[in-house]
Every structure is written in C-alpha cells, then in structure tokens.
Image (cartoon, rainbow, N blue to C red):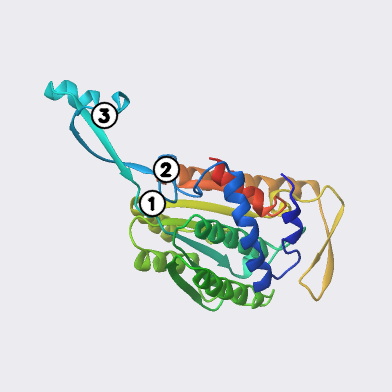
Amino acid sequence: MNTDSDNKLSSGAYVSLSELQQLRHFAKQCSARSGKSKAQLGGHHQSRSVSRGMEFEDVRPYQAGDDIRSIDWRVTARTQITHSKRYSEEKEKPIVTLVDQRRSSFFGSNPCFKSVYGCQLAALINWVTIASGDRSGGIVLGSHQIGETRPARSHKTVNRWLQQLSSANQQLSARVTDKFSMSDALKRVIHTTQTGTEIVIISDCYDLDDDCEKQLFYLSRHHRVTLLWVVDQLEMALPNTAKVTISDGQNVSQLALQRSISEGFSARFAAKEARLQQLCQGLRIRFCKAPVQTPAIDVIMGLMAR
C-alpha cells in the first residue's frame, strides 16, 4: 500500500521530534482504514483487541431474552440446566512499546537506518493507541540510558515519550558504546509494567540471548507480547555485485564480495530468522519481520488487520 503519508516518513540516519509528531495525523486514518472501531495491534493468536471489545464474564442459568447463540452447551450438559454465557465490555488494555535505539540499529541502506524505522513504528503504534481511546507509554533502550514513560491517555504523555525517543535516536553514532543490553530493558519492563498490559518490542534482536529468552518467557505469561524484528535488506542478502560501498557517516570504503561470502551471509540470516520464529512460537509471542524497505505504515496496518 502506498499513500501520501509515506512521503512524510523520515529518511536517512536520524529522526526529529516534529517528524514523529506528524505521524499523529495518519494514525487517525489508520484506525479508520482498518475497518475496526478500535485498533488491534499486538498479542498472540488468542489475544483480544488492544482496546475495548467484549470479553467473557461468567455463566448463568438461561433467562428469557438471552441469545440462543450464547448457550454454554458443556455446562448445560453437565448440570442438565440450560446455561448462558455472559459477556461484558472488555476492560482497558494499555500498551507499552519497547524501542531499541542502540549502536546495532544505527545501520541501513535505503530509505533510512533501522533506528529511524524503529522510531516510526513506535510513534505510529502510540498515536493509533491514543486515537483508540486507550493508554499508551513506552520504554526507550538507548546506548547510554533506558528512558521510560508510564502509559497514559493523553497527547502530552505521547509527546513526552517521543521526545525521549528522538533524543536517544539523535545521540547515536557509529562510535557510540552501548552501556545497556536488551536483557536490561526487558527487566525494566517486568518490574514496571502492570499485568495484562500489551507489550510491543521493536528491535533488531542482535543481543537476544538466553537471559532475554527467560525474561520473554515471564512476559509472555503475564502480557500479550508482539516482537517487531527490524531488519535491513543488506542483512537479508548482500548485493549481487563484485564490490559494495559502505560508510560510517564520515569515511567511505569498498569491500570485495565473493559468492561464498554472500551465500554464507544469507544462510546465517535465515538461521537467525528461523530461531526467532521458533522462540516466539514456543512462547506464544506474536512475531513480525519488519524490513526497513517496507513502509512503517504498512507494517502497522498489517498488524491491525490480523
């Protein structure tokens, strides 16, 4: 899907606060185009809507006027008395977005770096959540600090978090040294997030180790979790050319590519993708590969359509 809003998305190595704020206007259209009155973003295959819908409450003896489709046939057979299922409006489900803004994400080919793309995804998720009437917050995993904004139902809160996000993004460079790991950020999520909160993790997963898997196991038992795996086309497959030009923003170099190197590179990427898919399937975590070359808007629309 291509829209005029695609042109508003940042390109290059950095993103500004104003660019993330502008995505608010598209988020309203995003909810409308999805065909849903409320946005659906995260959770595994058994999850309900991020925002309010109808959820099961209890079972009671059948009463005149009850919808016959609500009859609980198992309870009816066991008790020999007709029972109906009762539903009530689903309670609010806040959403917290964990965004990775460390050195490994400061990489990309076209149209932008992974770090910028992650910011776009996070901003859209938060604006869509607010437009749906639910609380939104976030955690920024930066190279030098972990920033947090508690979920709230206000534009002021989203703007404050986007300020943290854009600030962490603009501090990135090829020479920065990471002081925090993904494990550190997941521990922060565990300790500060209310049970039942929707969790969306946006990362390139370069340091997703055994400790992270243990923390994801805990999170998946208490939350609905979605993993957006941010990747660049150069990580999936090297160019079909004899030489490739690379740069750290200051220096430019050319590397000679051999066929065996390219094949091994692609094989390692495929193995990592398979491992992540297997991990998420085992933990009942929703997994979505998000290539930078796919408009962030399309990724969010795809999540809402599931």
How far apart marks 2 and 1 lie (CA) works out to 10 Å
Indicate the quadrant where residue 254 lies.
Answer: bottom right
- Of residues 295 and 112, the one nearer the viewer is 295
Could you tell me the amino acid type at mark 2?
Gly
- Dot 1 or dot 3: first in sequence order is 3
Q: For the residue carrying disc 2, how many other residues have a C-alpha within 10 Å: few (<14), some (14-19), or many (20+)? A: few
Q: Nearer the viewer, residue 107 or 31?
A: 31
- Position of residue 168 relative to residue 292, above or below, is below
Number of residue marks = 3
| Residue 10 % position (x, y) | 73, 64
Residue 76 visible in the snapshot: yes
Circle 1 is placed at which residue position? 220
Mark 2 lies on a secondary structure that is: helix
Q: Nearer the viewer, mark 3 or mark 2?
A: 3
The kind of residue tagged 3 is Asp
Q: Is residue 123 left or right of residue 76?
A: right
Give percent across and percent down for residue 84: 23, 30
Q: Quadrant of the N terminus?
A: top right
**Residues at discs 3 and 2 in contact (Cβ within 8 Å):** no
Q: Residues within 10 Å of mark 1 (few under 14, many from 20)?
A: many
Whichever of labels 3 and 2 marks the residue nearer the N terminus, that label is 3
Q: Residue tagged by mark 3? A: 66
Tell me the quarter of the picture where residue 93 sits: bottom left
Q: Residue at x 58, y 43 (%)?
A: 34
Of the residues tagged 1 and 3, which is closer to the observer? Answer: 3
In the drawing, does residue 187 fall left or right of residue 203? left
Task: Please identify the quarter of the rendering in which residue 86 is found.
Answer: top left
Local crowd size for mark 3, using a 10 Å CA cut-off: few (<14), some (14–19), many (≥20)? some
Whether residue 186 is situated above or below residue 222 in the rendered picture: below
Disc assigned to residue 282: 2
